[in-house]
Amino acid sequence: MGYIIYDRRQYRAENIFTGELSGPYKRPPTRDQLPMRERVWKQTKGPSLFRPTRLVRVTDMEVIQGSELNNDEHYCTISYSWGQSGDIVKIKNDITGNDDYDCIDKGKHTIIDSPTKKVKIKGQSRGRRKIRIEPKIRHVKFQDLIQQMALDFGAKYIWYDKMCIKQDDPEDKKSEIRKMHQVYYHSLFTLIVIPELRTCRRYHQTASGAFKSTFRVTSDILHYSGYGRRSWCLEELYRAQLFVCIGQNAHFWSDCVNVDSVQKIAYHHHYLFSICVKHVEWAACTALYHAHKRVSTKDHDRIFSLANIFPQTMKYISINYDQNAIDLMLQFYKALVLMDIRLLLFGVDYTNDLIAMEIRKRLNVEMPSWVGMLHTHILQIVENDMEPINPPPKYTVNNLMSIQITSRFIKAKLVKPPAKEFPNRRCSEPQHSKPAFHQGYYKAHDTFISSNINNDLDDNSNTYNYYRRSSMPSSTQQVDPLLSTRYPTTTTKPNELIFIHSQKRDEINFKNRSFPGYYSLRPTHRLPLNMVRNAQIISNSNNIPLPKPLEDGTNAGYLSLTDDNCASIIILSELAYTTCFPELIVMPVIAKEEENYKSIGICFLHKCVDYPSVEKTQEFIIE
């Protein structure tokens, strides 16, 4: 993946979202940062008594025993992408006979001690008054690069995997892998190497109309860099209580990320919230949201890194690279779902993220449906997100990797909207006080729908605008909120809901605050409010406001389903969880497949729907 350039004159990003910078410094940036962070660390957490088996002394890069440190001394950890430390070559393992990989460091990493500059010559009256001083550059190996970074940021002892783990000793490697989560959690801070992180010039228009250029640091680099796509890097990021991302000529600390500023409608903002807000413990769905989109040199490392995020699962798996990778994954996912059933919360990715998709397709062949290997899990984007509303029901996982659960549930049907029908009138004709209607009958679903034609017309057509104007009430007219939607009305059975297939699957409307797009999921179906029976709607007297009319109508729920061929679904309402919106909850969805069931997505439901009144209880086997 190339070699790294490190400029010792570093800019510090004060606010990672605005990209505000300070510096460059004439001296290394440790003088005004590290002492402050040491004091904060000692006040909040205190010195840790945990010591890794081995550490590296930064001054001479010699390996020492971790027990040699005093109680008041700290160590730091190094986190980097293995592919950025040198040239990756494929070799043949003499013991197993399988293909293996090795990293060959040719010493092409670059350290810039001082940049190019011009110095003014005093006493010269004419001619050239400045001379150019060439930069001081060193080409070093990765170990020397790590040493210089550690010295610049004040680390005295570091844990560096290549030197602190005996790479040719399988038993030592097993022992150290089991302790990785402790090594990173108890470190003073973690130095993260991200070569793509650097300043860039941006232009903005001033009040006078002139354009001014400034230097900024992009906030999405942590997610879209090569480092952000490695499995082991995810575990190291999550376990590190404080980290500093070091790039080519800029860096930022994890505690510069403000919780309120992270909670925005942006993909990389949600990523930074998950990584930087340390007091939020990850749910299984959040961990898999990140983990399934990452790659590793070996399939075993995908599980070993995930097991360090959830150390409770370590006792159920064996740390051995010679075992079958599929069997290892099945053991881990079984232990994980028994610990946290929020693993069932996944849907369709709205960005069509195909990262690691070929690997995921290969691994998904023998995975149960509830793992969601090919799809995108929901993630926690605010505090107190994905918290259980009800006590979890009892469930088990049998030897066939099927979940046996007895839970309350809601039945729902899926229907498609009527075909487009355009009126013969033109926009220039007189307006009518009532909109046009047409009717459709669905024999397959035994559902009668009376649909407002505004729902099916193109937003850009004159016909749509004509009927939209004719159907809009005046400012003084009182409108029933249950009838103000432009979506179909229907007569349903008392114990089920009707969801309409969403036609605008590729459009994300962030103005709708009850939208799965906030969680990076694509809505495939919607529940119009006027398709819910009046008896199933909780009135405003219970302090539950009704959904607000938005551009896509007034909807009381959404589905994000990975299977569009289902005519009916089961919503596991007992497994309800909170979301970033107080009026919205999320629940897993399953569908019938032969004699048993399979996981196919999630349901977002507004609290105005009195779903407990239509609940039933049944035992399900989810394959």
Image: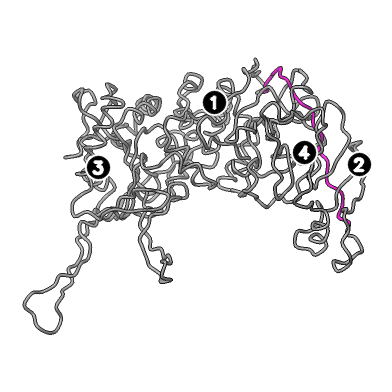
Precedes in sequence: disc 1 or disc 4: 1
The furthest residue to the front: 476
Q: Tag 3: residue type?
A: Gln
The residue pinned by badge 4 equals 529
Q: In the shown orientation, is residue 95 left or right of residue 192?
A: right
Residue extent of the magenta highlight: 402-421
Precedes in sequence: disc 3 or disc 1: 3
The residue pinned by badge 2 equals 442
Q: What secondary structure do most residues of the magenta stretch adopt?
A: strand
Tell me if residue 320 comes above or below residue 249 in the rendering: above
Residue closest to the eye, 190 or 576: 576
Tell me if residue 7 comes above or below residue 485 in the rendering: below
Q: CA distance from mark 4 to mark 3?
A: 54 Å
Q: Tag 2: residue type?
A: Tyr
Q: Secondary structure at mark 1?
A: helix
Q: CA distance from mark 3 to mark 1?
A: 40 Å
How far across and how far down the image is residue 4, in percent? 33, 53
**Magenta stretch: residue 420 in it?**
yes
Q: Secondary structure at mark 4?
A: helix
Q: Secondary structure at mark 3?
A: loop
- Mark closer to the observer (4, 3): 4
Precedes in sequence: disc 4 or disc 2: 2
The residue pinned by badge 3 equals 33
How far across and how far down the image is residue 493, in percent? 87, 29
Q: Tag 1: residue type?
A: Phe
Q: CA distance from mark 1 to mark 2?
A: 44 Å
> Is label 4 in contact with label 3 (beta carbons under 8 Å)?
no
> Is label 3 in contact with label 2 (beta carbons under 8 Å)?
no
Dot label at residue 489 = none
How far across and how far down the image is residue 542, in percent? 69, 26
Residue at point 37% right, 40% down?
A: 254
